[in-house]
């Protein structure tokens, strides 16, 4: 089975505050082992965690070999103070703060850098993204520093302008990637970036009743259209469910993601995603850039 190239071991798919609170002060090995067992039983042998500020992903990396799983972590996501990501990551105020955080990831032998450069989708209003994104200049500076220290970069990014700026700056993977226009899809496909669209975060909400299905369906349909075009243009696509996010459960999320992507790619799905995972495995490991 394919791996899951975007998970959050710290989260449980139910409620992020309670999931994080379960690990405060003491990382819960029992919860990590339960989730690693589920992945092993599903035949998953590769996981790339989006990180957390509580040490959960790092402990999961220590335990994962017992379950036959290769596990990669950024240690913690990094966000500009006051912008999206502070609930799970660590905030910086200046580029010097950020440089020090990159150094901390190196000290802890993190495998790559995880950046939060935009907000998340407002599922109540089509086209709306929470939180102001970083500017293209800020995005380039962050990626340049990470690459200069020998790290590949995983970027949480939504919105055409933000995604285009990250691709132009040489980011290694785009996570989520909602609301791209045709020009951005074309630019991303030609950049060599791996796109991890995390459709399950939208698809698994449909019918849930929490958000309007009309908005969710429109978002999902747009993502599927962009995926089909992106792959036609030669872009690299990998499976990542964002497992742990609301309604996206560990191990099950990967299968949900595969089925959703299949709507766009049909019989080519497995081959496309296998190639994308191979590229993720190549790029996102200790001492690997680009």
Image: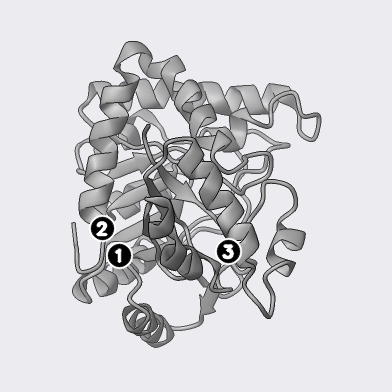
Find residue 88 and report its image quarter: bottom right
Q: Residue at x 46, y 43 (%)?
A: 40
Q: Earlier in the sequence, mark 2 or mark 3?
A: 3
User: Could you tell me how far apart the alpha carbons at marks 1 and 3 are, in whole angstroms?
Assistant: 19 Å
Mark pair 2, 1: CA separation: 5 Å
Q: Does residue 39 sit above or below 58 in this rendering?
A: above
Q: Which residue is mark 1?
A: 140
Q: Is residue 77 visible?
A: no
Where is residue 123? Give x, y as percent: 68, 38
- Indicate the position of residue 203 as horizontal and vertical percent values: 60, 28
Q: Is residue 281 left or right of residue 265?
A: left
Q: Which of the pair 224/169 is nearer the observer?
A: 224
Secondary structure, mark 2, is: loop
Residue pointed to by mark 2: 169
Q: Image quadrant of residue 114?
A: bottom left
Residue 84 visible in the current orientation: yes
Mark 2, mark 3: which one is toward the viewer?
3
Q: What colour-coding does the image apply?
A: one colour
**Mark closer to the chain start, 1 or 3:** 3
- Dot 3: element: loop
Q: Label 1, secondary structure: give it.
A: helix
Query: What residue appears at the point 22 percent right and 76 percent down from the top-left corner?
Result: 149
Mark 1–mark 3 CB contact (< 8 Å): no
Q: Circle 3 sits on which residue?
A: 85
Image coordinates for residue 35, horizontal then vertical, percent: 57, 50
């Amino acid at each position: 089975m394919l791996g899951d190239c975007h998970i959050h071991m710290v989260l449980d798919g139910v409620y992020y505050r309670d999931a994080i609170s379960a690990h405060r002060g003491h990382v819960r090995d029992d919860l990590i082992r339960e989730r690693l067992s589920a992945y092993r039983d599903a035949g998953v042998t590769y996981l790339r965690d989006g990180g957390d500020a509580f040490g959960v992903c790092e402990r999961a990396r220590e335990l994962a070999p017992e379950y036959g799983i290769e596990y990669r972590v950024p240690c913690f996501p990094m966000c500009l103070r006051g912008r999206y990501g502070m609930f799970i990551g660590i905030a910086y105020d200046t580029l010097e703060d950020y440089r020090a955080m990159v150094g901390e990831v190196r000290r802890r032998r993190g495998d790559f850098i995880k950046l939060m450069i935009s907000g998340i989708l407002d599922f109540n209003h089509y086209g709306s993204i929470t939180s102001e994104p970083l500017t293209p200049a800020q995005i380039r500076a962050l990626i340049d520093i990470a690459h200069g220290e020998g790290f590949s970069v995983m970027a949480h990014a939504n919105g055409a302008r933000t995604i285009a700026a990250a691709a132009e700056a040489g980011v290694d993977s785009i996570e989520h990637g909602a609301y791209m226009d045709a020009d951005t899809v074309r630019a991303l496909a030609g950049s060599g970036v791996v796109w991890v669209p995390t459709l399950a975060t939208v698809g698994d909400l449909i019918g849930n009743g929490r958000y309007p299905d009309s908005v969710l369906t429109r978002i999902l349909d747009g993502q599927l259209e962009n995926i089909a075009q992106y792959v036609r243009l030669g872009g690299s696509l990998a499976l990542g469910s964002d497992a742990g996010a609301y309604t996206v459960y560990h191990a099950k999320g990967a299968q949900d993601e595969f089925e959703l992507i299949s709507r766009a790619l049909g019989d080519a799905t497995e081959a496309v995603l296998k190639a994308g995972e191979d590229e993720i495995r190549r790029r996102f490991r200790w001492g690997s850039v680009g």
